[in-house]
Amino acid sequence: MLKDYLRTSLIGVLVLLLLGGTTTPVVAQDPGVAAARRVAATAQLAAEEYRLGVSGGRVIAKEEVAEAQLFLTEARRSLKLLPASSVGVVSRSLDTLDAMVGRTAHPDSVAGQVAVMLAAMARDLKIDFDEIPDQTPSLARGREIFETTCSVCHGLAGRGDGPQAAALTPRPANLSDLNGLSGSSPLDFYRRITIGSAGTSMAPFEHILSKPDRWAVALYASTLRLPAPAGVAPASLRNFSATARLTDASSNHCASSRQTSVGRSCVAALARARQCASAPSSPPKSAPVPLPTLVTKNVRAGC
């Protein structure tokens, strides 16, 4: 459950409708394709939750495995909406995944089975499940949605201390927790916002917010835990297709030295990489400064 951080992420977007706020119109997509995307996202989240709950052939966190099972159940609910050509392979794959979870299979095996299922659907339907936009989402738009709606629960700084937080169970996520969310990428936020979280109060927003708005608020939320941007982001990381999948922990060096000056500089460079493409509408908090050679190399390696 990523320590309940993403399971309640951005609950407050629902308030947008209650307060009469406006969003970019949601563009309808083919029901079969929409169902396939939902199956893909829920299966991927199931694999992520399962990995958190199983280690060394035994269950170490029952609640994580239980949530993985809930996500697989949610995936089955979309079977009847899939194109006929995909129903058989998806149904068999979900049967296999249920059996693997039941016998406490290795997390890599579960993730591998999910990957096989997604590859088969992608070939059949000729679609990209991640839906990563060509252009970097607008941080300004993401901030607008977050501050107008999400802050009611999460607070303006994302600390989970908004005026409605006390009434929610579980409590809203602390989106400013650098260590707790180090394994979460903007894509992870986008998936949760799109499909919600089974068995929790996190509702799906695929029919409430447009894809650009979901990406915008996902990217903005993913920056709340990061320090002020610093350093020079490599050209390779100015492409959103790279940073969308990038977690704070993508570099072993950054993950192991988070509390050191070098580690903090590395994460600050990640903040620069996430924000530089949106600089015209959301200027960086500090001017670029050269990074130590070691840090720059790690940034190039994916931090």
Image (cartoon, rainbow, N blue to C red):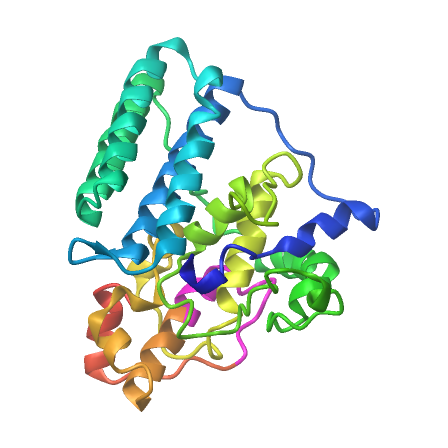
Furthest toward the right, the residue is 20
Quarter holding the C terminus?
bottom left
* Image coords of residue 94 (percent x, y): 31, 28
Counting the numbered discs, the total is: 0
Residue 36 vs residue 265, the one in the foreground: 36
Using the image, determine if residue 93 lies above or below residue 256. above
Residue 207 highlighted magenta (yes or no): no
Residue 226 vs residue 85, the one in the foreground: 85
Using the image, determine if residue 208 lies above or below residue 272. above
Residue 284 highlighted magenta (yes or no): yes
* Image coords of residue 240 (percent x, y): 40, 52
* Image coords of residue 267 (percent x, y): 36, 75
* Image coords of residue 34 (percent x, y): 50, 26
Q: What residue is shown at x 53% (from left), y 68% (from top)?
A: 175
Q: Is residue 261 left or right of residue 33?
A: left
| Quadrant hosting residue 141 | bottom right
Furthest toward the top, the residue is 84
Using the image, determine if residue 101 lies above or below residue 300. above
Q: Please state the extent of the stretch shown in magenta in the rendering.
A: 271-285
Q: Is residue 221 left or right of residue 245?
A: right
Furthest toward the bottom, the residue is 261
Q: Is residue 125 left or right of residue 6?
A: left
Q: Residue 123: in sight, yes or no? A: no
| Quadrant hosting residue 1 | bottom left
Q: What residue is shown at x 24% (from left), y 43% (from top)?
A: 111
Q: What residue is shown at x 72% (from left), y 63% (from top)?
A: 167
Residue 222 vs residue 66, the one in the foreground: 66
Q: Residue 90: in sight, yes or no? A: yes
Q: Is residue 9 left or right of residue 165?
A: left
Q: What residue is shown at x 42% (from left), y 47% (from top)?
A: 67
